Image (cartoon, rainbow, N blue to C red):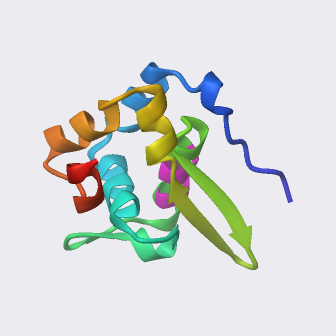
Amino acid sequence: MRPLFHPALEDIKPEAILYALSDPERAAIYAQLAGAACGNTCSALAELGDRVIPKSSLSNHFKVLRESGLIVSERQGVEMRNQTRCAELDERFPGLIKAILTAYGQIPEQLKTG
């Protein structure tokens, strides 16, 4: 199995974050991950409201989020666990993630106070 690409914190570019979160589905997926107490599997985030995202689209969304540096993914058996890098990203780009998710109306409680 191919290793997953995760950029180092210093290699993350704001334009990659903006591109990744420019898609409303990816922004909603990211907001759900940011609001989770711990990592979540890809399939657990397949439903957005009354819509189910196809597996192929979901895989692509997670790839874009991962390669932009927004999430860290780890294989656990047949599942992929995903966690945000909110704290790290807020240190590097203060307020950026919160501002983007607020614009979508998707701000999780953990980010409201932070």
Q: Is residue 90 left or right of residue 100?
A: right
Give the answer, above or below, for where 88 lies relative to 12.
Answer: below
Residue 81 location in percent, x, y? Answer: 60, 68
The image shows residue 75 at horizontal and vertical percentages of 72, 67
Is any atom of residue 19 visible in this view?
A: yes
Report the residue at 40% width, 61% height from top: 33
User: Does the magenta run of residues contain 26?
Assistant: no
Q: Nearer the viewer, residue 61 or 4?
A: 4
Drawn side of residue 11 relative to residue 110, left or right: right
Residue 59 magenta-drawn? yes
| Residue 77 left/right relative to 99 | right
Q: How many marks?
A: 0
Q: Residue at x 86, y 60 (%)?
A: 1
Closer to us: 55 or 111: 111
Residue under the point 22% across and 60% down: 109
Residue 56 vs 18, above or below: the answer is below
The residue lying toward the viewer, choosing from 40 and 37, is: 37
Q: Look at the image and tell me whether residue 41 can be seen.
A: no
Residue at 69%, 62% in the rendered image:
74
Q: Residue furthest right?
A: 1
Q: Position of residue 88 (x, y in %)?
A: 51, 40
* Range of magenta residues: 58-63
